[in-house]
Image (spheres, helix red, strand yellow):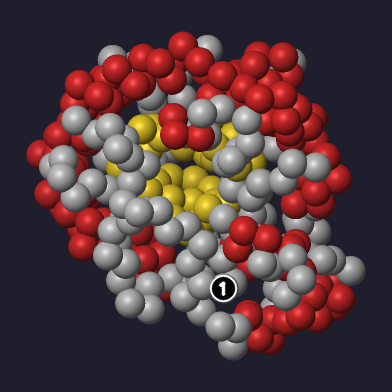
Amino acid sequence: MTLPDRKYVELRGERVPALGFGTYPMRGAACTDAVRWALDIGYRHIDTAQDYDNEADVGRAIAASGVPRRDIFLTTKCGNARMTARQVEDELAISLDKLGTAPDLLLLHWPSATVPMAETLGAMAAAQRAGHARLLGGANFPLALIHEAVEVHAPALGIDLFVHQFESHPLLRQPRIEAATLAAGMLVTAHSPIARGRAVGNPVLAQIGRKYGKSATQVALRWQLDKDGVMLVPKSTRRDGIAENFDIFDFTLDADDRAAIATLPNGQRGSRPSWEPDWDPAG
């Protein structure tokens, strides 16, 4: 059987590794070590954020890895509680210093109930024009905000949004958000794709994994990788866990596997900060 090539996703001339490495909530030497291990193993897509307080740790790992910077797709995020234009500008300057490089992708981390999206995206657009980020996107947007960002603000600012990152895993299947993201001309990045550890011992995922000699975790990750236009950023603090998460390119799920996953309980959201937006029912 010929497996589909899912190592990269492509959009508007950009070719990005579909399997990335997430870094939340790692900090300090543990974060630097994990990113170094990930790069040694073969990851070439690293995800961080201002609010993770680990950009300096990620930057040190990239600098020490020996991997050419041009070969790494680096994402960071701005905003959250500091979303005014001045705050975004000030925080991005700090991010650039900590990372020691400009990110390939800058995301608006969370939508705000108080600062207009146009202001935050406007500051991000200015950063892109200044060469501080090649690509822009958003994260954790419900359906209405996807449409607002793409149909109202992006045209007004003269920008294209490249990625929408949101929580997605077999226990939080969000087909409407996923479809709206792709229809809006953006790629999907699934964060928390192992359901913050809940996928590890899931019996349905484990049963599927036995067909392929894979773990429940690997099945959860492959479920994302099998989709067109979808990237994912799993995290592990252990070198063997990081390697296991990368070992998902030699199998693919069949229709029966996907049907079994569709029977799992849904709506089990793990990322629930106090500032979360009103989520769309049923995704």
Q: Is residue 59 visible?
A: yes
Amino acid type of the residue tagged 1 in the rendering? Leu
| Residue on which the image places disc 1 | 171
In depth, the one of 64 and 82 nearer the eye is 82
Q: What residue is drawn where x is 80% and y is 42%?
A: 238
To which quarter of the image does residue 257 belong? bottom right
Q: What residue is drawn where x is 73% and y is 75%?
A: 202
Q: What residue is drawn where x is 25% and y is 24%?
A: 87
Q: Is residue 205 visible?
A: no
For numbered disc 1, what is the local secondary structure? loop
Is 192 left or right of 198, judged from the image as shown? left
Instruction: Find residue 141 and report its horizontal and vertical position in percent.
Output: 31, 56
Instruction: Find residue 135 and report its horizontal and vertical position in percent.
Output: 37, 32
Q: In which quadrant of the rendered image does the C terminus lie? A: bottom left
Vertical relation: 143 (above or below) 119: below
Is 208 left or right of 90, judged from the image as shown? right
Q: In which quadrant of the rendered image does the N terminus lie? A: bottom right
Question: Which residue is most to the front?
Answer: 274
Vertical relation: 142 (above or below) 89: below
Instruction: Find residue 138 and report its horizontal and vertical position in percent.
Output: 34, 45
Instruction: Find residue 29 and report its horizontal and vertical position in percent.
Output: 72, 24
Q: How many marks?
A: 1
Is 91 left or right of 54, judged from the image as shown? left
